[in-house]
Amino acid sequence: MQADLGRKVGELATPDMLVMDETSCVAEAVKAMKKKDFSSVLVSHKGTKELVGIITERDILYKVVAENKGPFKTTLKEIMSTPLITVDESATVLEATLIMRNKGIRRLPVKRKGEIIGLLTLMSIVGNMPGKSIEAGLIETGVGANITCPYCGSGFESKQDLSKHVDRLHIGSGLLEGDLRQI
């Protein structure tokens, strides 16, 4: 099935979402993300179902690991991106893509009558557009299929290679790979 830029985002949004209370610690979120193989968590207001923010793997890396904050002491409220930017299910893929580009985000919760019904990701848009020949790397980095390090400009073939590079060179010696030695 070929998606086009006029397609409604409600058709592409996945209803599978991980939602956690803002008082949860980052370590709990990471465990849940790993278990469900999710790259983000929607954050709800304390004791309610009202969604107030989102955290991503990048938030954890930059706001917890890089800042030497303890994942068992840091709450989701401390690192979440807020306010939560959303899109209505009737919006087009083009409209959603422009919101993502303009806001510098890769995930958009999708609403129906004020309630979040799913999550739209940049990768879900790209993955559903085979006839358009859009490279994921082009949309995310603007430099074609190669992925570029935002710190030094080095090129990589995969996100995993970039992550290892950032971990080893820019953060510390293997911190994310379990090597806690300090340089």
Image (tube, rainbow, N blue to C red):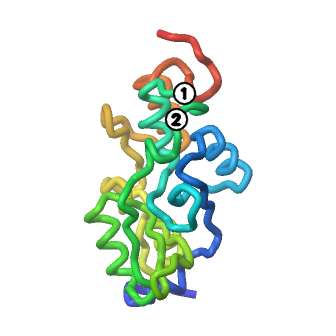
Residue 74 is tagged as 2
Residue 130: where, in percent of width, then height?
50, 77
Element at badge 1? loop
User: Which quarter shows the N terminus?
Assistant: bottom right
User: Residue 136, located in which quarter of the rendered image?
Assistant: bottom left
Residue 97 vs residue 30: left or right? left
Residue at horizontal 48 percent and vertical 33 percent from the top: 64
Element at badge 2? loop
Residue 93 vs residue 34: left or right? left
* Between 29 and 171, the one nearer to me in the picture: 29
Residue at horizontal 39 percent and vertical 40 percent from the top: 155
Check whether the beta carbons of the residues at disc 1 and disc 2 lie within 8 A of each other.
yes
Q: Name the residue under label 1.
A: 70
Where is 48 relative to 46, above or below?
Answer: below
Residue at horizontal 32 percent and vertical 80 percent from the top: 95
Where is 2 relative to 166, above or below?
Answer: below
